[in-house]
Amino acid sequence: MEDGYGGRPPEMRSVRARLVTRVVHVWFAMTRSMTLGVRAACFDAEGRVFLVRHSYVPGWHMPGGGVERGETLAAALVKELREEGNLEIAGSTDLVAVYFNHRTSRRDHVAFYRCEVRQLAPKQADREIVEAGFFALDALPEGVTAATRRRLAELAGEMPVSEEW
């Protein structure tokens, strides 16, 4: 059934979000043959998950970002958690899966982790992250993206782990 959005997820339906994503991926296409990112389901000691809301794309997401040349996945994960949430890894870090993110581009892959974290200080809004916080799994904020909900359902064993983001 055609939804009028060409199969785009809700967070990619705005012109601004598509434009920013496209510009970033064109830049990466000129500098890389494939894009690779990291995202993580970050849980605090109370079992709450940390989510962020970006300035440039709608919805609540798990923290993460791109892996730079010469950077390991682990280093990228530590960097992104620090930048997006003032988070540090406080326990186990498990690689859940590597996903093909074809909805963003035909070249994008995401390494998804589950980790235990502690927050060093509350995350203040900035140019990239306009809102962030820990949420109980049964009290997620309105606007959590479909991909974020799928990853949480996979972690809970409510659905099998997919190969696609």
Image: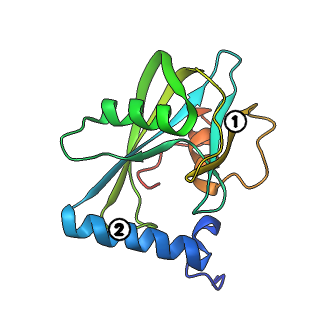
Residue, disc 1? 133
* Structural crowding at the residue carrying mark 2, measured as other residues with C-alpha within 10 Å and reported as few (<14), some (14–19) or many (≥20): some
Residue of label 2: 25
The residue positioned 34% from the left and 37% from the top of the image is: 76
Residue 8 seen in render: no
Is 122 displayed left or right of 99 in the figure? right
Above or below, comparing residue 91 to residue 96 in the picture: above
Which amino acid, mark 2? His
Amino acid of disc 1: Gly
Q: Position of residue 93 (x, y in %)?
A: 43, 22
Compared to 90, does 84 lie above or below? below
Name the colour scheme.
rainbow
Q: Secondary structure at mark 1?
A: strand
Task: Label 2, secondary structure: give it.
Answer: helix
Density class for disc 1 (Cα within 10 Å; few <14, some 14-19, many ≥20) is some
| Frontmost residue, 77 versus 161 | 77
Looking at the image, which residue is at 24% across and 38% down?
71
Q: Nearer the viewer, residue 95 or 50?
A: 50
Q: Residue at x 38, y 66 (%)?
A: 24
Question: CA separation, marks 2 and 1?
Answer: 28 Å
Can you say whether 44 is above or below 3 in the image? above
Give the x, y percent position of residue 10: 64, 68
Residue 134 x/y as whole percent: 70, 31
**Residue at image location 57% in from the left, 63% down from the top:** 56
For residue 87, which quarter of the picture? top right
Q: Quadrant of residue 111?
A: top left
* x and y, in percent, of residue 119 in the image: 60, 22
Whether residue 92 is visible: yes
Labels 2 and 1: the sequence-earlier one: 2
Q: How many marks?
A: 2
Q: Is residue 42 left or right of residue 31?
A: right
* Quarter of the figure with the N terminus: bottom right
